Amino acid sequence: MDLGLNGRTVMVTGASGGIGREIARGYAAEGAHVVLTYNGSRDDAEAVAKEIGERSLVAPYKLGDPGSAATLVATALEWTGRIDVLVNNAVRWGGRPPGPGSTFEDIADAEWTEVLRRNTEGAVRLTRLVAPLMRERHFGRLVHISSSIAVDGMSGGEYYGAAKAALHGFSRSVAFSLGRDGDILSNVVLPGFTRTARNEAMAKAVGHLYSERAPIGRLLEAAEVANAVVYLGSAANTGITGQVISVTGGA
């Protein structure tokens, strides 16, 4: 199947590792130009870019920083003159109870508000910046990466789950707004616990708790989640918008 991504420009935030790295690889395999953003590890992002080749651009991006978002978009436009697909994948972890016996209300205000602000505002701000570009071309794809914590819940994930759930409501309304101005679609991909190169130790320790609940009897690999993201962000997707797509192996 031709996904219609050849020559298009795709921006993937948080592309230096985990699911983000596989998303970047997936789009590159379809002939897209890929902007890979990183926060802390430029070396990891450069390693992914080296695999992709000349159709990649590495750029810093600090989630939730207005100036960083504007600079990122300007950098991408200077490179190819267009942004066809935005994948909001970068996250800001945190907001967990500080120790045994602690509760979510024990977390300092500065910590939990930062988790909410960065994870929500980061995706919203970048979407606002690229929306006019997509309207101008009458084409665009937005894919926001959420988490099963947003719907299943998890002790210690109160604030992260709240931030991710906010993306569901935002994406749904954006789908109506942008869909009236062209072939512009907005969706959320909701992964469950997924095996990545970064969480191998955790997967070995607790992965069975998730795989036992899944109809397929195993954890998904990051590349499997990326496959769904690439399709939803492609021209081959012509009718899926405003949806939250679970990619969890059925768990």
Image (cartoon, rainbow, N blue to C red):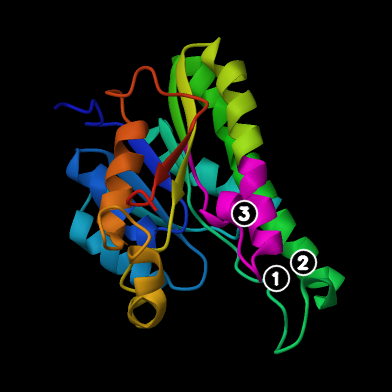
Residue under numbered circle 3: 68
- Label 2, secondary structure: give it: helix
* Quadrant position of the N terminus in the picture: top left
For mark 3, does the 10 Å Cα neighbourhood hold few (<14), some (14 to 19), or many (20 or more) residues? Answer: some
In the rendered image, residue 92 lying in the magenta stretch gets the answer no
Tag 2 and tag 1, C-beta contact below 8 Å: yes
Residue 17 appears in the picture as rendered: no
Q: Residue at x 38, y 60 (%)?
A: 213
- The Cα–Cα distance between marks 3 and 2, rounded to whole angstroms, is 22 Å
- Label 3, secondary structure: give it: helix
- Label 1, secondary structure: give it: loop
Q: In the image, 177: left or right of 144? A: right
Q: Which region shows up in magenta?
A: 143-167
Q: Residue at x 22, y 51 (%)?
A: 54
Q: In the image, 221: left or right of 240? A: left
Q: Amino acid at mark 1?
A: Gly
- The Cα–Cα distance between marks 2 and 1, rounded to whole angstroms, is 5 Å
Residue under numbered circle 1: 95
Q: Nearer the viewer, residue 172 or 22?
A: 172
For mark 1, does the 10 Å Cα neighbourhood hold few (<14), some (14 to 19), or many (20 or more) residues? Answer: many
Q: Position of residue 14 (x, y in %)?
A: 46, 58
Q: Nearer the viewer, residue 170 or 128?
A: 170
Q: Position of residue 166 (x, y in %)?
A: 67, 43
Residue under numbered circle 2: 112
Q: Residue at x 22, y 31 (%)?
A: 6
Q: Amino acid at mark 2?
A: Trp
